[in-house]
Image (spheres, rainbow, N blue to C red):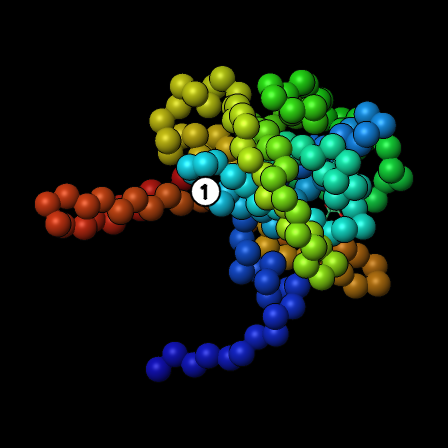
Amino acid sequence: MVKVVTLPPNKETLTLLNLKPTVIITTVGKDGSTNAAPYSRFSIVDYNPPQALLSTNMKRDTYRNILETKEFVINYPGTDLLKQIWVTSKHFPYGVGELEKANLTGFPSEKVKPPRIRECKAHIECKVLWTKPIGSSCVVLGDIVSISASTIMEQLETRQKMIRLNPPLYFAFQEDEMTRKWMFAEIGKIHTITEKDEEIQVTSERL
Ligand SMILES: Cc1cc2nc3c(=O)[nH]c(=O)nc-3n(C[C@H](O)[C@H](O)[C@H](O)COP(=O)(O)O)c2cc1C
């Protein structure tokens, strides 16, 4: 018999269970300054209409900019950008451009003011529909107004697209007096469930 234990609903448990790609959110303030910060508490809520949800701490510049200009871009970095992700997570004073600090390149979006990040593999542009504070965070719902990806992505078949995206999957933060650690997983296997004539087959490929 499998034994179960009750876990506390704390940051450690919920981060582990919320295994998600880490994205970099870009926003602009009403003063025109650009902000970039990593986020893992986000999701695509629906395909029709296409909408995305984000949960942001209300002390952050991202939150201030979202309230001021009501737009954001979800940029998808690969695991090759882990150091840059870490730099953008630092608490710089308001108005300091994290993209320059992290050596990342902004380029104009198609439908919104916040820039896309050239080094990222895909981008989702959003216009804010509503915000709802919950505890110290605020949930933000955005209308997806444009999606783009580096041209190489377009030519690949679905599995190859996922391999190329290679998202860093954030699952833990640990710290002691000396060190702070962020831990990420990376996709190493693809499983396909095929249903044909009511027969189901599961195939697994190691990457
Ligand atoms: C991997 C990772 C994921 C994160 N996810 C979130 C998140 O979902 N929501 C949030 O409010 N902060 C999240 N953070 C923390 C913010 O990135 C951090 O507070 C950042 O400094 C905010 O920047 P800003 O003040 O420029 O907006 C995350 C940090 C890391 C490293």
Q: Residue at x 43, y 30 (%)?
A: 161
In the image, residue 65 lies at what x, y percent?
77, 37
Residue occupying the point 54% across, 28% down: 145
Q: Nearer the viewer, residue 62 or 4?
A: 62
Residue 88 in the image: state x and y as whole percent: 75, 38
- The residue wearing badge 1 is 46
Q: Residue at x 70, y 55 (%)?
A: 133
Pick the residue in front: 184 or 95: 95
Which residue occupies the foreground of this view, 115 or 168? 115
Percent x, y of residue 194: 22, 44
Amino acid residing under circle 1 = Asp
Residue 44: where, in percent of width, then height?
Answer: 50, 42
> Could you tell whether 158 is left or right of 193 in the image?
right
> What residue is at 68 percent from the left and 42 percent from the top?
38
Does residue 103 appear in the picture of this structure? yes
Classify residue 91 by image quadrant. Answer: top right
In which quadrant is the N terminus drawn?
A: bottom left
Please say if 66 is above or below 183: above
On the question of residue 102 being in view, the answer is no
Above/below status of 187 relative to 71: below
The front one of 25 and 188 is 25
Q: Quadrant of residue 26?
A: top right
Q: How many marks?
A: 1
Q: Is residue 72 left or right of residue 2?
A: right
Quadrant in which the C terminus appears: top left
Could you say which quadrant of the image residue 29 lies in? top right
For the view shown, which residue lies furthest in the right direction? 93
Q: Badge 1: how crowded within 10 Å, few (<14), some, or many (20+)?
A: few
Q: Farthest residue toward the left? A: 197
